[in-house]
Image (cartoon, grey):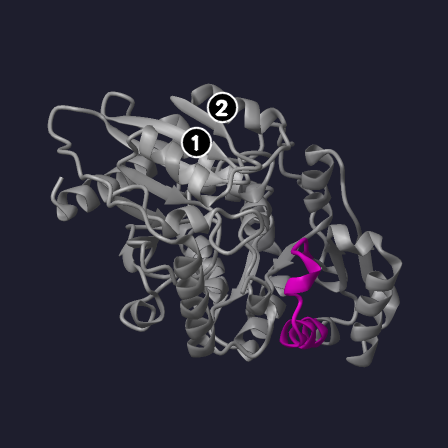
Amino acid sequence: LFHRHYLEPVDARALFAAHGEAGALLTAAAGSLEPVSLRSIQGRKIRIGYVSPNFSRHSVGYFIEPVIRHHDRSRFEIFCYYAHARSDDATARIRAIADGWHDIPDADGSELAAMVRADRIDVLVDLAGHSKANRLEAFALKPAPVQITWLGYPDTTGLPAMDIRITDAIADPAPQADALHSEKLVRIDGSFLCYQPPVDSPPPGDHIHPPSAIVFGSFNNVAKISAGTLRAWSEILEALPGSRLVLKSASLDFHDTADRVLEAFEEFGIAAGRIELRGWAVQREAHLKMYEDIDIALDTFPYNGTTTTCEALWMGVPVVTRAGDVHMSRVGASLLHAAGLDDLIAQNAVEYVEAAVALAGDEERRRELRSILRRRLENSTLLDHAGFTRKLEHVYRDALVAAGA
């Protein structure tokens, strides 16, 4: 299911049907538990449980850590169920601010469900969806009265036991997105994301290239580079003969993958010498400093970037995205709207190429954006950690009230 999101063209109805089939299979395999009782929330703290294999230096970690840190502890107790054996500095920080912590790398669905019931969790939040090391089999058992999916997966879970999926009006516009989810969609005002930049971030660079030598870049997973994306990038490079493109992805450390990427560009008439390939950077600071070499970041489609887009903006690099019809194709639009860059949101491939070429030629604007984007991000809803967490808490409380708590 996860890998089907990389395929082009996107068949939204077929994806929805496939998730429904998976949800039915998980439900049948999980069996059943005696329904958990719904406790009144009057006069007590609400217990929230977050389930993820990514409480670490992972994309999900950069978005969930500020939420856990800013929860109102006078009204909420926060429990984390960590479904992975790795541990790093981000894991240590998140563990230190959680009220309860369970390491569950080897726990099966029934074991996790038992922990959740023992902790008397009111709202259980899935942060993985159908991605690696998820624990959806536990959610299928409905160990908490309200179950929500958010953040770590770009689609419905298809699980009848999952009550809500949290999103926003741009990432999942009504009413078309509602018909493609088994969960009720709850849209948060502003973006559905809340970003915490890495603690070791270097300052944005101050050098930009002239239009005659513009450097584009994309640090997205190579799997997101569709044929349509390759075609659009090639058209941009063809329109600007002195331009180059820097691609960075861990899989580019493999020679066969790197060769395949270069061959794909050559098929579109772009010489390999105009494409620079970079692999994994061990140090986060080294990774972020690579944005100093980039003038404009080019988003992938139909599967947009998320963390990479936030990182680029944080490092003063504007991003051009193309908005599609489903969530994974609209995350870029959600992020750029929050950053006040709506003019860099294209609605089709032609507009995407035009926006990139136009921005390349506007050296004055690129210089201005390089100097103000980090500050603009700091003042946006994307980095309003406390404000976003209050919105999330309202969703949790309202869901419990609607359920009768």
Residue 398: quarter of image: top left
Mark 1 closeness class: few <14, some 14–19, many ≥20 residues within 10 Å: many
Q: Is residue 401 visible?
A: yes
Point out the tag, 2 or 1, that comes first from the N-terminus. Answer: 1
- Label 2 and label 1: CA atoms lie apart by 8 Å
Residue 126 % position (x, y): 41, 46
Query: Which numbered dot is residue 80?
Result: 1
Residue depicted at x 40% and y 65%: 24
Instruction: Choose between 153 and 227: the one closer to the eye.
Output: 153
Residue depicted at x 56% and y 77%: 349
> Considering the numbered disc 1 on the image, is that residue within a helix, a strand or a loop?
strand
Q: Which residues are magenta?
A: 218-236
Q: Is residue 383 visible?
A: no
Query: Which numbered dot is residue 95?
Result: 2
Residue 120 as seen in the image, left or right of residue 403: right
Going by the numbered disc 1, the residue's amino acid type is Cys
Q: Is residue 327 magenta?
A: no
